[in-house]
Amino acid sequence: MRERSGLASKVLAEFPRVNLISILAGTLALISVFLPWWGIDGSAYGFSASLNWSLWGRPYIGDPTSSTAVAQATQTMGMFNVFVLGLLFITVAIGFIGSFAKEKAYLATGFAASITTLIVYAAAVSHVITQTCQGSSSCISGPIGSTAASGTVVNWGFQSGFYLAMIGGVLTLFAVIFHQMFLRPDENLVRSITSQRSKFCSDCGHTLQTGAKFCSNCAHAAPIS
């Protein structure tokens, strides 16, 4: 009976613990890939229109043949999209690996990568807007804002994909804390299990005397310590 109890404790101590918070964070970040990350909405005299940017390919900024600035901005944002997309996939992979790893280093790296991804994308959008507008007072400024004039209302800013990735990054931070507090190996339990292996007979569960080579109850060979 004692042997069964010791075996159950061993399984409990050595069974891989999964960080479900990290899996959820990685899933949200993966879903965000397929959603728009930035967009602009406008309405005037009962009519409305919107333009959204995703991470796939080059975003539509305007007719590339209309000006060199628009062509360059389109190409620049396309390159940034590829870079951000790569960072995001790396973040998701690290998050999933960290869900099963014993050490928290993977999760900490995943959190840093998710924050880096968001910062890079926000900086890219700001740079492309500045590059396109070239200081024009009639153009939007900054990655987030709104303006209204003569019955026309324009709002621009980050969309669901960006904010979903942000939530994933926050969850990754909580996953690091959760891992530190609840998923670390129980050293006392492992030490106790290790000591129990030499205290009881593996055949009948009888208590072994210190230094005994055979069980005094069933003559079974004692485990070698």
Image (cartoon, grey):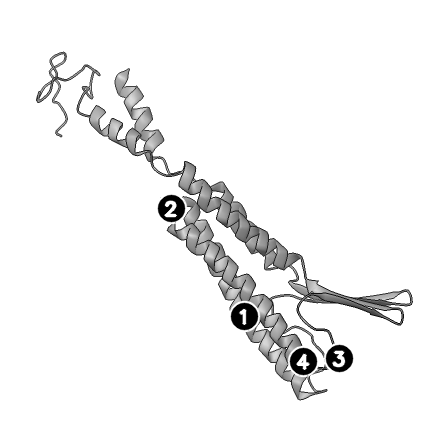
**Residue 156 coordinates in the image, percent (x, y):** 72, 66
**Amino acid type shown at disc 4:** Thr
Indicate which disc, 1 or 3, sits on the residue closer to the N terminus: 1
Amino acid type at circle 1 is: Val
Q: Which mark is residue 101?
A: 2
Q: Distance from label 3 to label 4 (Cα)?
A: 12 Å
Residue furthest out toward the top = 217
Alpha-carbon distance for marks 2 and 4? 45 Å
Q: Relative to residue 144, is residue 124 drawn left or right? A: left
Kindly identify the residue that appears in the image at 43 percent across and 52 percent down: 108
Q: Secondary structure at mark 3?
A: loop
Front one among 21 and 127: 127
Tell me the tag on residue 82: 1
Q: Nearer the viewer, mark 3 or mark 4?
A: 3
Cα separation between marks 1 and 3: 30 Å
Taking 224 as reference, is 110 left or right?
right
Tell me if residue 51 comes above or below residue 193 in the rendering.
below
**Which callout, 2 or 4, points to the residue nearer the camera?**
4
Secondary element type, mark 2 = loop
Q: Which residue is mark 4?
A: 132
Going from the N terminus, do you reach mark 2 or mark 1 first?
Answer: 1
Pointer 3 residue: 137
Q: Amino acid at mark 2?
A: Ala
Relative to 223, 85 lies left or right: right
